[in-house]
Image (cartoon, rainbow, N blue to C red):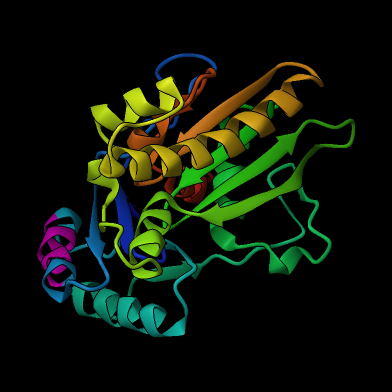
């Protein structure tokens, strides 16, 4: 049976479709796979985009309701809308699993003081990364509406989610400056281009546009690099970078890292696999 994976984030719904017999192994040993054949996204503020999902999902289903695994951080209103969309697409026969954060899963222990308080996106993304990179120390960075930095460490009794950092995402930083100052222009992630990258490397910009973009990029990169260097002092560590702003943030990083389209979807895929 086909599987539909859904990541309901703060800004967008991301999805992936795994057909029957989809490959579950990475193309290269020690690499993160993208084990789905189709994927896409829709913004919450664009109902037409969500409506277009109906035709796409129905075409992929071919008259058979898929198994659906969902992670949601956007609250009950969006959950209700997605639930109604799935009923419209597949009727009431689709098997839905709304994932919740737990104390442990798949050999990974949740080290949060109150495990259920950990955001399900951070938990599921860590499960996905650990599933394919067991026994390794991981810094998992998701550059989305918020930028999250999470640490997974190996331990004698199983891997452990140690916790992490949450800071405003790149778009939030850029937008906050414009909204809360009198004369600074409003920029978005697409404005963090070559000029901003040169300013980050030169430690300064000669114009306001690049100064804002470079400052926000440097703040993102600084948090990531500081955390990674602290981890690297313990021993080998891998930095995994995901999220919608990953390409912009990646250009500012002066450290090794590897990117993945969506670690939350990868975690949902790992959870959906037969045990």
Tell which residue pokes out farthest to the right in this image. 156
- Name the quadrant containing residue 249: top left
Q: Is residue 32 visible?
A: no
Residue at 43% from the left image edge and 44% from the top image edge = 216
The answer to whether residue 127 is above or below residue 45 is above
Q: Is residue 239 visible?
A: yes
Residue at 26% from the left image edge and 53% from the top image edge = 187
The answer to whether residue 16 is above or below residue 74 is above
Answer left or right for 155 relative to 86.
Answer: right
| Residue 52, magenta (yes or no) | yes
Q: Position of residue 273 (x, y in %)?
A: 51, 45
Answer left or right for 212 relative to 121.
Answer: left
- Name the quadrant containing residue 96: bottom left
- Name the quadrant containing residue 69: bottom left
Q: How many marks?
A: 0
Q: Relative to the observer, which residue lies in front, 75 or 94?
A: 75
Identify the magenta region.
51-59
Q: Position of residue 103 (x, y in %)?
A: 77, 59
Answer left or right for 108 relative to 187.
Answer: right
The chief SS type of the magenta part is helix
Residue at 50% from the left image edge and 41% from the top image edge = 220
Q: Position of residue 158 (x, y in %)?
A: 82, 37
Q: Position of residue 275 (x, y in %)?
A: 61, 45
| Residue 253, magenta (yes or no) | no
The answer to whether residue 63 is above or below residue 163 is below
Residue at 24% from the left image edge and 65% from the top image edge = 43
Q: Relative to the observer, which residue lies in front, 215 or 272?
A: 215
């Amino acid at each position: 049976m086909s599987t539909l994976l859904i990541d309901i984030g703060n800004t967008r719904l991301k999805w992936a479709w795994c057909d029957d017999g989809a490959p579950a192994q990475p193309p290269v040993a020690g690499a993160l796979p993208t084990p789905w054949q189709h994927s896409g996204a829709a913004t919450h503020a664009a109902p037409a985009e969500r409506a277009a999902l109906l035709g796409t999902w129905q075409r992929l289903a071919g008259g058979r309701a898929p198994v659906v695994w969902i992670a949601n951080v956007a609250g009950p209103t969006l959950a209700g809308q997605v639930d109604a969309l799935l009923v419209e697409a597949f009727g009431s026969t689709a098997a839905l699993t709304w994932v919740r954060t737990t104390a442990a899963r798949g050999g990974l222990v949740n080290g949060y003081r109150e495990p259920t308080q950990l955001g399900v996106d951070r938990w599921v993304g860590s499960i996905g990364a650990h599933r394919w990179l067991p026994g390794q120390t991981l810094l998992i960075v998701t550059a989305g509406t918020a930028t999250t930095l999470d640490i997974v460490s190996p331990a004698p009794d199983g891997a452990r989610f140690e916790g992490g950092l949450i800071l405003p995402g790149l778009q939030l930083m850029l937008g906050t400056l414009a909204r809360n100052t009198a004369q600074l222009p409003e920029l978005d992630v697409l404005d963090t281009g070559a000029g901003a990258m040169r300013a980050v490397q030169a430690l300064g910009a000669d114009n306001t546009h690049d100064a804002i973009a470079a400052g926000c990029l440097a703040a993102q990169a600084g948090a990531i690099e500081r955390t990674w260097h602290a981890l690297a002092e313990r021993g080998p560590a891998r930095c995994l970078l995901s999220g919608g702003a990953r390409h912009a943030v990646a250009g500012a990083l002066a450290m090794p890292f590897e990117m993945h389209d969506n670690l939350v979807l990868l975690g949902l895929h790992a959870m959906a696999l037969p045990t």
